Amino acid sequence: MTKADLTRQRLVRAALELFTTEGYHGTTTPRIAKKARVAEGTIYRHFRSKQHLLNELYRAAARWATKLVAETGAKNIGAREKLNELGRSLAAAAAREPAIARLFFIQRHGALLDEESHTAARDFRLALEGLVAQGKADGSVKPGAAEGWAAVWLSVVTLVVDRVSAREWAGDHAGVQQAIDAAWDAIRVG
């Protein structure tokens, strides 16, 4: 890695931590620079603005989450097993990378996100909807729009991501599997 790459990496880590603990509006560029141990102007050599930095982080988090869905979706198992495994993967990922999980799943950024970030979030939702559609096709998911059932499933699993990333639950806490089971129960036929 070059010195510039290392500097960018420090800026990304500093901003990620501050955005997820103090919020976007509570985080200033001087605080990011201080935490990354660089001059404030260095931020602007790597990112156009604080908002650009947020969007870069958000897109990376969205790609990370979409990759988890794709890896689970590629397995030759049923929809219930895929969603169960995805829920456990999200919990494990939230334990390993709590700030990334919080940035993508917990915090809301609304108007701060650019078109690329909205597209990255949509790619995640579409991938998840694809898993739910598999369950609809095999008759294991209730009738209705896959989009709606994916949102219901994700709402329940987001509780797991929130608790694990906040270090309130360990990855093996009984509530993790209980919530994942409840997410399935909310969308399954019968």
Image (spheres, grey):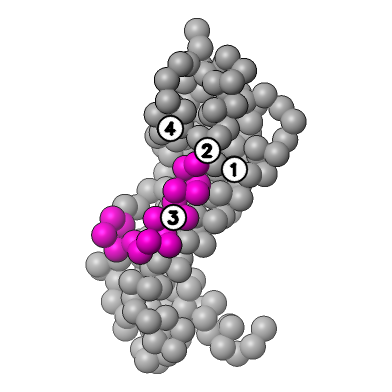
**Is residue 52 at all visible to an observer of this figure?**
yes
- Mark 3 against mark 1, which lies toward the viewer? 3
| Disc assigned to residue 119 | 3
Residue 151 coordinates in the image, percent (x, y): 41, 33
| Disc assigned to residue 128 | 2
Is 48 on the left or on the right of 175, as rendered? left
Q: Which one is earlier in the sequence, the residue at label 1 or at label 2?
A: 1
Q: Secondary structure at mark 2?
A: helix
Q: Which one is earlier in the sequence, the residue at label 4 or at label 2?
A: 2
Kind of residue at badge 3:
Thr
Magenta-colored span: 109-126
Residue linked to disc 4: 147
| Disc assigned to residue 33 | none
- How far apart are the two marked residues, 4 and 2, measured between alpha carbons? 9 Å
Kind of residue at badge 2:
Leu
Residue at x 63%, y 31% (from the top left corner): 82
Label 1: few (<14), some or many (≥20) within 10 Å?
many
Q: Is residue 173 above or below residue 61?
A: above
- How far apart are the two marked residues, 3 and 1, measured between alpha carbons? 16 Å
Q: Is residue 29 above or below residue 125?
A: below
Kind of residue at badge 1:
Val
Residue at x 67%, y 83% (from the top left corner): 1
Q: Secondary structure at mark 4?
A: helix
Label 2: few (<14), some or many (≥20) within 10 Å?
many
Of all residues, the one furthest to the top in this rendering is: 190
